[in-house]
Image: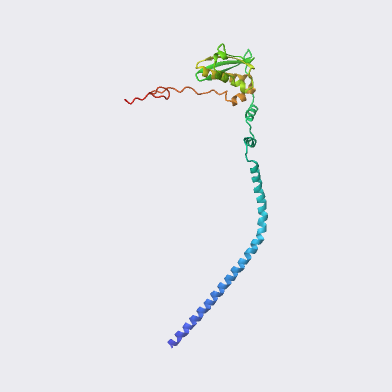
């Protein structure tokens, strides 16, 4: 009896396995059909969504094109174009500085109607008086052409009048002590600049922009011990 039951159980197991296979195959077919239907539905959804995206992208493309056109118009092909873009010209700086909104200082004159100032450069100290005149410059009782024989030194003295368009309109009397001719010329120039700003306060901005009101702090460097001068060493001797 036991031998007869074993073939029956085997047959039942085989039948169960075949039913499981059929079910799994049916499920797989159902999944493939669903995937195919999804693949067909996606192109339709994309086709429906594309017109909306194109409509949104068109304004963006136009907005991006406008800055590019502006950038092309701002291309620099010449130095003059660079000045136009920056809104700056070589003569514009001095005019803008001269027309600054800074409050003007009061005019400072002595009892003789002169403006006085002290100028310094290196070891030289200059006392300067200016007043309206024909443009004569006297240094230590002598004319500038006699005292400062070198044309470069006379050019330095007349720089404040040149930048303010006041050449030949003021007489200058100066006394200078200390230093050499170069330092004395710089001291007189510094004093003239200070005095000119006191006589005509509206010119102060122009003179200051040129740097003539600032005392030049450059002086001779001190000598160091163990050296011939400030940096010069003694001649080296090997023996």
Q: Nearer the viewer, residue 49 or 19?
A: 49
The reply to whether residue 119 is visible in this rendering is no
> Residue placed at 60% from the left, 68% from the top?
36
Q: Which of the pair 34/83 is nearer the observer? A: 83
Q: Residue at x 46, y 85 (%)?
A: 7
Residue 76, picture quadrant: top right
Quadrant holding the N terminus: bottom left
Residue name at image x 56 percent, y 75 percent: 26
Which colour style is shown?
Answer: rainbow
* Residue 43 location, quadrant: bottom right
Q: Nearer the viewer, residue 57 or 78?
A: 78
Residue sitting at x 59%, y 68%: 35
Vertical relation: 41 (above or below) 19: above
Q: Count numbered badges in the picture.
A: 0
- Up/down of 123 relative to 71, above or below: above
In the picture, measured across the screen, residue 135 lies left or right of residue 6, that is right
Q: Position of residue 161 (x, y in %)?
A: 61, 20
Where is residue 72 shown, x and y percent of the image? 64, 43
Q: Residue furthest left?
A: 239
Q: Quadrant of residue 136?
A: top right
Q: Is residue 56 left or right of residue 216?
A: right
Residue lying farthest bottom? 1
Residue 29 makes an appearance in the image: yes
Q: Give the quarter of the figure containing the C terminus.
A: top left
Q: Position of residue 114 (x, y in %)?
A: 62, 15
Residue 40: where, in percent of width, then height?
62, 66
């Amino acid at each position: 009896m036991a031998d007869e039951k074993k073939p029956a159980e085997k047959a039942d197991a085989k039948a169960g396995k075949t039913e499981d296979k059929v079910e799994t195959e049916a499920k797989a077919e159902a999944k493939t059909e669903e995937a195919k239907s999804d693949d067909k539905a996606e192109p339709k959804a994309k086709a429906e969504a594309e017109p909306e995206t194109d409509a949104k992208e068109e304004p963006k493309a136009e907005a991006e094109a406008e800055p590019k056109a502006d950038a092309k118009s701002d291309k620099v092909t010449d130095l003059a174009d660079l000045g136009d873009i920056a809104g700056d010209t070589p003569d514009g700086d001095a005019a803008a500085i001269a027309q600054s909104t800074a409050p003007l200082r009061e005019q400072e004159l002595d009892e003789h109607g002169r403006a006085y100032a002290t100028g310094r450069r290196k070891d030289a100290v200059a006392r300067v008086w200016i007043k309206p005149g024909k443009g004569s410059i006297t240094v230590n009782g002598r004319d500038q052409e006699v005292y400062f024989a070198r044309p470069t030194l006379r050019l330095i003295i007349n720089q404040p009048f040149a930048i303010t368009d006041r050449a030949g309109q003021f007489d200058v009397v100066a006394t200078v002590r200390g230093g050499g001719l170069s330092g004395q010329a710089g001291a007189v120039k510094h004093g003239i600049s200070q005095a000119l700003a006191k006589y005509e306060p509206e010119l102060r901005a122009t003179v200051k922009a040129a740097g003539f009101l600032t005392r030049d702090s450059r002086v001779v460097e001190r000598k160091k011990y163990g050296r011939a001068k400030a940096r010069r060493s003694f001649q080296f001797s090997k023996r």
